[in-house]
Amino acid sequence: MPLPRRWLTSCMMRYNGSSLLIDCGEGTQIALRKLGWSCKQIDTILITHLHADHIAGLPGLLLTMGNSDRTEPVTVYGPKGIDRVLQAARVFAPELPFRIRTVEFRDPEETFSASGLRITAFRVNHRVICYSYCVEVLRGGRFDVEKAKANGIPLKLWNPLQKGATVEYEGRTLTPDLVLGEKRRGIRVVYSTDTRPTPDIARFASDADLLIIEGMYGDHEKDADARQKKHMTMPEAAAIACKAQPRAMWYTHYSPSLLRPDDYMEEIRKIFPRALAPRDGVSVSIPFDDDETE
């Protein structure tokens, strides 16, 4: 439930002029306004599961987006049933000026592109069907003039090949690897909440830039509750991070009884030193390794 200084679950990722929202709990709009961020640029919404604390903010958010003169379509991804939820939300927002497209996952793992990002949804272990998300900025190699010349690529085709196009030219199929160097490390953020520990979380979070993960309970006396309700304790999440070794880990989705997550961090950092127990509104800009802007 929301607390005076803590709203319900939501995470926004902004890239290249677009915004991607994961979950939309009660108070999401207030949290965005405090940051000075607009909901008008949200092109993609990812829903982890259909419990109310993750979706109750959707009707109001859609209304605000409509009132901001947005006309571009919005795509909402989630587990089976998300289309029904969106249809119900239209009772509160019947005349939106933009189209809502829904995509329901069918498989345990699905990869797709949205807002210029590669996104993998993978099923985790909660009381209802629930997905976690791996969000990636992929990054090709640098343009290599000498390589392009050595492969006999005409100058007029350098630009489309550099941008990733495949070109048919004089009986040859020309691919981007003919003009690009080795692929470079991109950016990867993994978001996982409302689940018991699963091997896939560590698999996707391996060497990620940021792992955002549930820390429902801090006390070991809550271990039984976590198992029964299919949630994760802070030590369990830290153990996943210790195995995966992301560059940073943030906790989210605290129990209402967990008023001071920082109280547990001294012990948690003995398991994973790069752990943080953030408050609402925390944000970070993640650069490429060589800090280049593209």
Image (cartoon, rainbow, N blue to C red):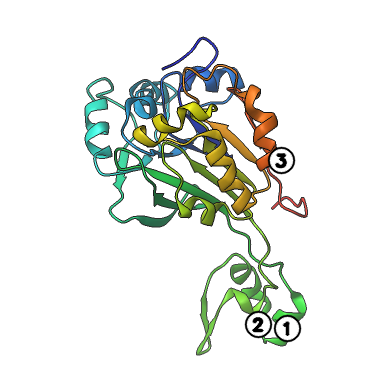
The residue lying toward the viewer, choosing from 54 and 125, is 125
How many numbered marks are there? 3
Q: Which residue is mark 2?
A: 153
Q: Amino acid at mark 3?
A: Pro
Q: For the residues marked 2 and 1, what is the alpha-carbon distance in whole angstroms?
A: 6 Å
Quadrant occupied by the N terminus: top left
Instruction: Give the residue drawn at x 61%, y 36%.
Output: 250
- What x and y, as percent, mark residue 25? 41, 25
The residue lying toward the viewer, choosing from 47 and 152, is 47
- Asked whether the beta carbons under mark 2 and mark 1 sit within 8 Å of each other, the answer is yes
Query: Does residue 269 show up?
Result: yes
Instruction: Give the crowd class for mark 2: few <14, some 14-19, many >=20 residues within 10 Å.
Output: some
The residue lying toward the viewer, choosing from 163 and 267, is 267
Q: For the residues marked 1 and 3, what is the alpha-carbon distance in whole angstroms?
A: 48 Å
Q: For the residues marked 2 and 3, what is the alpha-carbon distance in whole angstroms?
A: 49 Å
Instruction: Give the residue drawn at x 53%, y 40%.
Output: 236
Please, is residue 8 above or below residue 85 in the view? Answer: above
Q: Amino acid at mark 2?
A: Ile
Residue at the extreme top: 4
Q: Amino acid at mark 1?
A: Lys
Please, is residue 182 above or below residue 230 in the view? Answer: below
Query: Does residue 18 show up?
Result: no
Q: Which residue is mark 1?
A: 149
The numbered dot on residue 273 is 3
Instruction: Give the crowd class for mark 3: few <14, some 14-19, many >=20 residues within 10 Å.
Output: some
Residue 51: quarter of image: top left
Instruction: Give the residue drawn at x 45%, y 37%.
Output: 193
Q: Secondary structure at mark 2?
A: loop
